[in-house]
Image: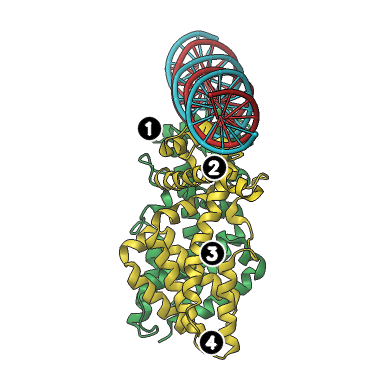
Chain colours: A yellow, B green, C cyan, D red
Amino acid sequence: MSRSNEEKSSFIAEARREQVIEATIQTLDEMGYVHASLSQIAKKAGISTALISYHFSDKSELMNHVLSKLISSSESYILERVRQENTPKGKLTAFIAASLAYQSLHPKRTTALLEIIFHARTPDNIPYYKLGDEDEDVLVRELQQILRDGQDKDEFGLFDPAVMASMIQGAIGEYMGNTPITRQVDLETYSGELVNIVCKAVKE
Amino acid sequence: MSRSNEEKSSFIAEARREQVIEATIQTLDEMGYVHASLSQIAKKAGISTALISYHFSDKSELMNHVLSKLISSSESYILERVRQENTPKGKLTAFIAASLAYQSLHPKRTTALLEIIFHARTPDNIPYYKLGDEDEDVLVRELQQILRDGQDKDEFGLFDPAVMASMIQGAIGEYMGNTPITRQVDLETYSGELVNIVCKAVKE
DNA sequence: TTTTTATTTGATCGACCAATCAAATTTTAG
DNA sequence: CTAAAATTTGATTGGTCGATCAAATAAAAA
């Protein structure tokens, strides 16, 4: 009963929240964080601004919901493909390829994610991009684990897994946020070349 | 006469502009782009907001001045060190080490640079970070040139210079903007490890 | 000196923002 | 069907923003 009550009462609310989150992603992609005001988001969703305030306590709560949705979407896509591989090299290749593939599959989500990470700040004004997710960032941990596994199994040589992981993520993020390289080489090429380079760098 | 006139009349103006630019860098570092309003910058500089408007036609002109100053400062520091080396491998190592060293030498400038690049937009609302500087970005061209030189001289093996350059810049930028890795490994270690990894990846 | 020009300020303008609230509407429960 | 609860809106509030302007001040020129 209480459960059914929860579900029923939250059905409309949940749908509305989902709609607002979608509209926020669209708005972030099209106009950027600075211009993604509640009124712009409301206009995109075809509702009033007060309705957003009714379903989200404030703007930062809304952005946090959007952010966690974007992160978990990306994470599940990548981890799903990594887990289909058995060898460290296979997992590493899958990690890189899936990370880049996700971006080209969901460019709007990728842009929205970047906009939030680089603009949003904690109540004490610390930017999200300077926030150390360390343990919380599942992808970083997964990548570092893959690298350590490869070293343990003597499939990979000697290197600092933290630095190697950072380099790989930097290379992936570079294609995400940096247009010049996007125009110089297409995603397929970039993905393949990056895998080649990393595999050589990682080799024993 | 007209020259002396220019110099004299612009002496105060130039000093004031420089002061405003410095205050802007401080404000960007301490509060971020979103909160770096003209009044905050003016407060930091100890002047009125109208005075900023008197010396800069509008906010975006101010930010563009700050940006170009930050970019040229970083460029000259790095290029100076690269040009002291003669071999591709020496230049490559110097490029990486100098890029990372500059960040730790001028963390405030680095933060301010990031804040502008990720927040500022053109009049038609295109974010700077999506703007393809391609030919304009001196550092990208220099790095790609080093890589091609190395390949021509058979010092480096086969790889796509654009992808390799992008990966290196991504790795450098990752340490710049990403706090978690900063806490895991110090700059010296990161720099050294990154050089090692890249040299191995680049090897014939 | 006096006059002209450059610099600086305080006040003000219109625009947009996030958040709030009472009232209207819709949905659910009894 | 009716009462209560949930949903939605339009209007408003207090605030900050960038830009502008006339007036004050300082500097330079005459």
> Considering only order in the chain, which callout, 3 or 1, is on the residue closer to the N terminus?
1
Query: Residue, x 43% and y 43% (percent of image)?
Result: A27
Question: Do dots 4 and 3 share one subunit?
Answer: no
Give the side of residue B15 with respect to residue B188, left or right.
Answer: left
Q: Which residue is mark 2?
A: A13
Query: Residue, x 37% and y 62% (percent of image)?
Result: A104
Residue type (three-letter) at the residue carrying disc 4? Phe
Query: Residue, x 42% and y 78% (percent of image)?
Result: A195
What separation in Å lies between label 4 and label 3 (alpha carbons)? 23 Å
In what element is the residue under mark 1? helix
What separation in Å lies between label 1 and label 3 (alpha carbons)? 49 Å
Host chain of mark 2: A
Q: Position of residue D12 (x, y in %)?
A: 56, 17
Query: Front-most of D24 and A16?
Result: A16
Nearer the observer, disc 1 or disc 3? 3
Q: Which residue is mark 3?
A: B174
Residue type (three-letter) at the residue carrying disc 3? Glu
